[in-house]
Amino acid sequence: MLVSGGTVVDVDGRRSASVRIDRAGQVEAVAGDLHLEEGEVLHDASGCFVIPGGVDVHTHLHLPVGALRVSDDFWTGTRAAAVGGTTTIIDYATAYRGEDPLESFRRWKRWAQPSAIDWALHMTFTEAIPDRVLAECIDEGVTSFKLYMAYPELLAVDDEVILDVMRRASARGGLVTVHCENGDAIEELRRRAVEAGRTAAIEHARTRPSPLEAEAVARVANMAERAECTAYVVHCSSGAALAEVRAAQERGVDVRAETCPQYLHLDVALLEGPEAPDFVCTPPLREQRDRDELWEGLARGWIHTVATDHCPFWSDDRRRGIRNRPDGFRDFTEIPGGLPGIETRLALVWEGVTAGILSVEDWVRLCSEAPSRTFGLWPTKGSLRPGADADLVVWDPEREQSLAADELSMRVDHSPYEGRRERGWPRLVLSRGRSVAVEGHFVGERGAGRYVPRRTVEPEPVV
Ligand SMILES: [Zn+2]
């Protein structure tokens, strides 16, 4: 197969070139002077950018939440990912307290079998774990471990466990990803709000203020410094939190930050609107000045990656709440948190390119290359160098796409971006050399995705 006539953008820069893909589904050559050979299929990429497929390192598919389950499973979610230009995901498997983490890992692997694109797993720990478990995870290709500082009743671990997991992970070439919010302080704010009768959705944001996110980021950076561990801050949502990421980076601590499209585009005022329950996510949506600072962080390299935290729920489920009450949730603490986004990430970050904030190279680095490198998928994923998997997107900067729920492929009945039209969408998406999306339509196969065991972390150049 030859993808010809486009502008290739990857780690080696931007140039007019063709991409030759071999029968094994790997990149064979990228060069300006490749000509169609006998028996080869030609894909015309004229007017388009040819980039490595998107790598979304933060998804929640098939996930049970209270009495509910997210609306996308691994089949429907990865199908939508492919349509939007993402060809690899890393989902979060969770070992709840008292569970054997390897058993949880195997359960998530079973759930993920129908995936249409390649997939990997992070492992979330909710209590102290023996060293043997980390070794076994790494043997299975799981090299990143998530810890929560929020949700004390179900997920959070204390600082002693965080520091301990950091030391053990680092010693084995792994890294730790952390949900940074001061969970105990937030619990107090939530309890007081409910007691005072402040029960509306906007209280979700008011009880999770950005200083409590920033404080947790600073604490994680301090612990990462002591443990000499790479710490990856998931879903950085605020200017205050980003300032702590920067402060740590400037003194040489290896803290990397992820943000998500919802924190780049959506305002907290949506939590006071008529569809407020559809906009509950954690951390909560913030303000314009936070978005300005996050965009600057992307352009300046302080934020390392954009992932989605894709975690969709049906509208009715959101209104019944995590206790699934037929008469509706009693207060904001029962609204399931999380937004759909696995399909729209590349397009929503591309807006930064059309706005002149990011270069095309930045966009590729943030959505594909950096997540691949950070999480041990490099150079198989996130790269178009010879030998890489031919996960490739032909990105048409002129193609228009509505972000209304009924014009997208995600299995969910509302869109956070209802009414918005994007200019810039994939014309063609390949997964290991096979078409998975053409002109906005899924053409791949259920179960065609493979589990990708990940490598331990290599030091990488600071951007
Ligand atoms: Zn998440």
Image (cartoon, helix red, strand yellow):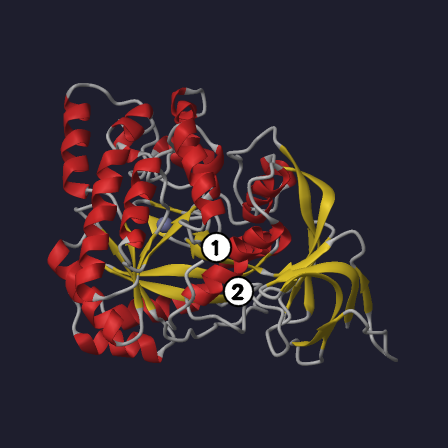
Horizontally, residue 97 falls left or right of residue 50, namely left
Numbered tag placed on residue 133 in the rendering = none
**Residue 299: percent from left, percent from top:** 49, 45
* Contact, mark 2 vs mark 1 (Cβ under 8 Å): yes
Classify residue 99 by image quadrant.
bottom left
> Against 300, is 319 above or below?
above
Horizontally, residue 340 falls left or right of residue 161, namely right
Q: Nearer the viewer, residue 461 or 194?
A: 461
- Counting residues from the N terminus, which is met first, the one under dot 2 or under dot 1? 1
Q: Nearer the viewer, residue 207 or 48?
A: 48
Some atom of ligand 1 lies within 8 Å of the CB belonging to the residue at label 1: no
C-alpha distance separating marks 2 and 1: 9 Å
- Per the image, the residue denoted by label 2 is 114
Which residue is found at the position 34% from the left and 71% from the top? 143
Label 1's element? loop
Q: Nearer the viewer, residue 48 or 56?
A: 48
Visible residue check, residue 150:
no
Which residue is found at the position 13% from the left and 54% from the top? 158
**Residue 48: percent from left, percent from top:** 74, 53
- Per the image, the residue denoted by label 1 is 73
> Against 366, is 408 above or below?
above
Which residue is found at the position 46% from the left and 31% from the top? 266
Which residue, as the protein is rendered here, is positioned at the far right?
38
